[in-house]
Image (cartoon, rainbow, N blue to C red):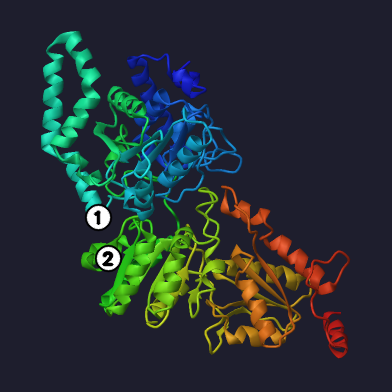
Amino acid sequence: MSLLEGIRGPRDLDPLGKEQLTQLAGEIRKFLVTEVSKTGGHLGPNLGVVELTMAIHRVFDSPHDSIVFDTGHQSYVHKLLTGRHDFSRLRMKGGLAGYPQRSESIHDIVESSHASSSLSWADGISRAFAMTGQGDRHVVAVVGDGALTGGMTWEALNNISDDNSRRLVIVVNDNGRSYAPTIGGMARFLNDVRTRRSYRKLYRTSRRVFDRLGPVGRAVYRGTRGAAHGFLSRFTNNEALYSNLDIKYLGPIHGHDLTALEEALRQAKGYEAPVIVHVITEKGHGYGPAVDDAADQFHAVGQIDPETGEPVEAASRPSWTSVFADEIVELADKNPRLVGITAAMLRPTGLNRFAEKYPERVFDVGIAEQHAVTSAAGMAFGGLHPVVALYATFVNRAFDQMLMDVALHQAGVTFVLDRAGITGPDGPSHHGIWDLAILQVVPHIRIAAPRDSTRLREELGEAVVVDDAPTVLRFSKGTVGAEIDAQRRTADGVDVLREAAHRDVLIVTVGPMAKLGLQVAERLAAQGIGATVVDPRWVIPVPASVIEMARDYRLVISIEDGIRVGGIGTRIRQELRAAGVDTAVDELGLPDEFIPHGDRNDILDEVGLSEQRIARDVVSQVLGTEGTRIPFARPLPAESVDVEERERS
């Protein structure tokens, strides 16, 4: 039996000697490469924290001591050390989540994958322990250097430093990267620490001197290592970053030297006050293909060949992200006012190609969505047209800035929201299902949802010429489906995808839900029910032609991949009532729940967004059968009934 198979909880690490721990670290890396290559997941970040996670669990006593991971994508090693070894369905329904999850283990605390929040969690937990007589419990927050670019981290540090009576250890996992290389002045400072020759030279020299003294010298070296780190840090000015914070600082520590890590963490634990332990790690450590990957060191991978790191199969169609990446460059070629802004996600959002061609026109602000949006408002005031590219789930963090800095000031800023709707394997905090409900309350905002690549290019071009209000373009994760051509386009830009002779049902689809709408219409036609399918393209504000068409139909069905509560369907219903149109509206979308990880199509089926389920419900609504789902379709006028019956007989 391997050493890893014998680890069923953190205390199983305690009796292991140095050689066994080294062997265990190797087994963990081999396990991660083997298993994650089958399922996909966050491989590079976890390979980089093997020794660090082992050291934390040897020094601290989870769950008595609370361990909080910032973002949580680097928690695979933590899962293994707390007894979760079945990675066969990682990030799939019924399998382990890709982030900490309380339902899996009492060792997991924070499930949200939104960065820069861990220190606030740690601040709150440690305060609660102090106030409830649990002063013997420690709190450990593991935060990456990328998360230090987020303002919330520094808000928490400001409060933590105001109360030095708590047992709180902040481990800065410094690998110089979030998704890609960490940027900004702070990143430059930390990079200087990582590469400063004065520190490395003193460190190597001191170790060689003590080693020459034999076993006694090495014992003295180990005993004084923490103090030496503190001295070397001060000598090389590493503490300057935290000079205005009343928090002890240890480091930098070699993040793959388990002995050094344990010594530093034990010293930090012994302070019984807030301590920062600065650890230098290498993302992808121990796996050549990851270390050599210049893009993101295998931050997140799909299924890969474990020997080479190459994808098992290439995508047959382009991704939504790649279509945007190409089109924004073409638009930038024609319009020198266009600039790009992203929050530590240059490559994931597709702005990397823009940056490669026009590096002076693309700004990566770090994990700082609020700053990104307000900075964009300032750029718009100065005569530019910013395109802010984010994941849909992360725009939630900058809602106030979009409302009060962009919209209030009528700033022409375009927001491109990638990974909108159900994203699948990354779970509740990565699904982009709230943006349609949240953003449509912003006055004068315009929201577009393309159904295919042609419409993405078209709508992006329309968005970037709006200079008096915020515009939003949202699209899904993954590959773009087949092109869906319209039969005709209305004067206000609504695409009619299918037009029925019998005006029974008007199906209004949002973005990629157009395919589903057409499939439903086919099934309804087989039942003798006429269904017209339209794609508004710009879903907010609701186009006037959608309201006018709805007058002539018995029932309106809206289909969207956002939450139903306050969604596009709700807005259509409100606009119909305001216009005096009494056609009933059935709003189909996602429940206002935290939806777990799983396959996108499976999740949509489970919530009722399948062609079979929708068509069955609509048939009963139109025919008025017993147990009919409400709302009911408006009855046909008496004279129309006779005509309908004759035509269908």
Residue at 79% across / 76% down in the picture?
633
| Vertical placement of residue 329 versus 131, above or below | below
Rate crowding at label 2 as few (under 14), some (14 to 19) or many (20 or more) other CA atoms within 10 Å. many
How far is disc 1 from disc 2 in space, using C-alphas?
14 Å
Which one is in front, 556 or 582?
582
Amino acid at dot 1: Gly
The reply, left or right, for residue 627 in relation to residue 15 is right
Residue 481 drawn above or below residue 236: below
Residue 515: x %, y % from top left:
59, 67
Residue 565 shown left or right of residue 63 in the figure? right
Residue 315: x and y in percent read 44, 54
Question: Which of 582 and 456 lies nearest the eye of the viewer?
Answer: 582
Q: Quick check: 567 above or below 397?
A: below
Q: Secondary structure at mark 2?
A: strand
The amino acid marked with disc number 2 is Val
Identity of the residue drawn at 56% across and 47% down:
597
**Local crowd size for mark 1, using a 10 Å CA cut-off: few (<14), some (14–19), many (≥20):** few
Q: Which residue is mark 1?
A: 184
Task: Residue 451: give x, y in percent of width and height.
Answer: 52, 70
Q: Name which residue lies at 42% across and 26% down.
A: 60
**Residue under label 2:** 362
**Res 641 → quadrant:** bottom right
User: Closer to us: mark 1 or mark 2?
Assistant: 1
**Direction from residue 361 to residue 10 in the image, left or right:** right
Counting from the top left corner in percent of width and height, residue 22 is at 34, 20
Numbered disc 1: secondary structure: loop
